[in-house]
Image (tube, grey):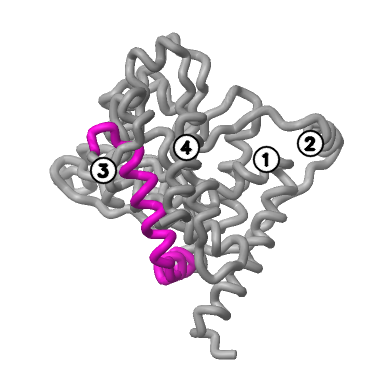
Amino acid sequence: MNENDPVHEIETTAARLAEARASIARRFIGQEQVVDLVLAAMLCGGHALLVGLPGLGKTRLVATLGTVMGLRAGRVQFTPDLMPADILGSEVLETAADGSRGFRFIPGPIFCQLLMADEINRASPRTQSALLQAMQEGEVTVSGVHRALERPFHVLATQNPIEQEGTYPLPEAQLDRFLVQVEVDYPDRATEREILIATTGADEAEATAVFSAADLVAAQRLVRRMPVGESVVEAILDLVRACRPTEADADAEARELLAWGPGPRAAQALMLTVRARALMQGRLAPSAEDVAALARPVLGHRMALGFAARARGEDLGRLIDRILARTLRLGAAA
């Protein structure tokens, strides 16, 4: 079979992704949905925000992904006193042996291929904003000079959902830069038992590299070449537009409960992630089922409940599920 045949490429890449998931599972046990969402974000060339309580393995997952995907990883521990230069780098004045003086740029930890932004909401808004250009444009500007980042470049950020003292909520513009928001929950009993046995002995299993940076870039190109049926495109448009309270075709419940809804970047994110999910499962094209599976992680951080809805205790995730059910039913009827 011709190796340039898309079917062959999809089958081969899907097999390697299954091998990558198996390698990750040796270090990050269980939580298959979390792993799949983060891998989908990376296959789309995007970034992921992992939200979960301390001790659930978020840091371990990011470190394991760097090994398995063959990426040069960096880490920044976000703290209230962290400055933008601590992330981007800075210029220092040096004196050469001949007495001449000049500035030399010292790159910061953002100059890597996989950046772990640990507890991102602990840094000030000024420092958080240092990531915006990097996440959107793949470059940073220091002292008026544009400096390109390596390809691929991904930010995997972690956030503690309960500790609010000394934290700064991420602004909407920055949240929108994350392709998906991944909720990391407690493992079930059987998984936790397996974690206890695997991680408290004399030896621990090690993850092995399955991809290289070039392989990941090739997989990202493949995702963008995958066909998307007209019915899936319409399902994405129907869902995103139904979640905008100001649209003429907005869902009635969205008009009542939402302060704002997802923008075009959310539709772009859904269009990419449904392809990535299909690729990971070895399918040639995505389906409406992929749209339903990815609605919460792609849309949840790009919309907000109104004050009255929050006061009544409404849940944004359940609202998305209800709008999704009505939208897909109407789409099927049409």
> Earlier along the polypeptide chain: callout 3 or callout 2?
3
Q: Which residue carries the number 3 mark? A: 133
Which residue is at the front of the view, 129 or 81? 129
State the separation of the CA atoms marked 3 and 1. Answer: 31 Å
Q: Is residue 246 magenta?
A: yes
Residue of label 1: 31
Q: Which residues are magenta?
A: 218-247
Mark 1: give few (<14), some (14-19) or many (20+) Cα within 10 Å: some
Q: In terms of sequence position, does the residue under pointer 3 or pointer 1 come before the other?
A: 1
Residue 215 versus residue 73: which sits nearer the camera? 215
State the SS at label 2.
Answer: helix
Disc 2 to disc 1: CB gap under 8 Å: yes
Residue under circle 4? 181
Going by the numbered disc 3, the residue's amino acid type is Gln
Classify residue 108 by image quadrant: top left
* Picture coordinates of residue 206, whole percent (x, y): 73, 49
Residue 19 drawn at (x, y percent): 68, 62
Number of residue marks: 4
Question: Measured along the vertical axis of the image, is residue 127 above or below residue 234?
Answer: above
Of the numbered discs 2 and 4, the one sitting upstream in the chain is 4
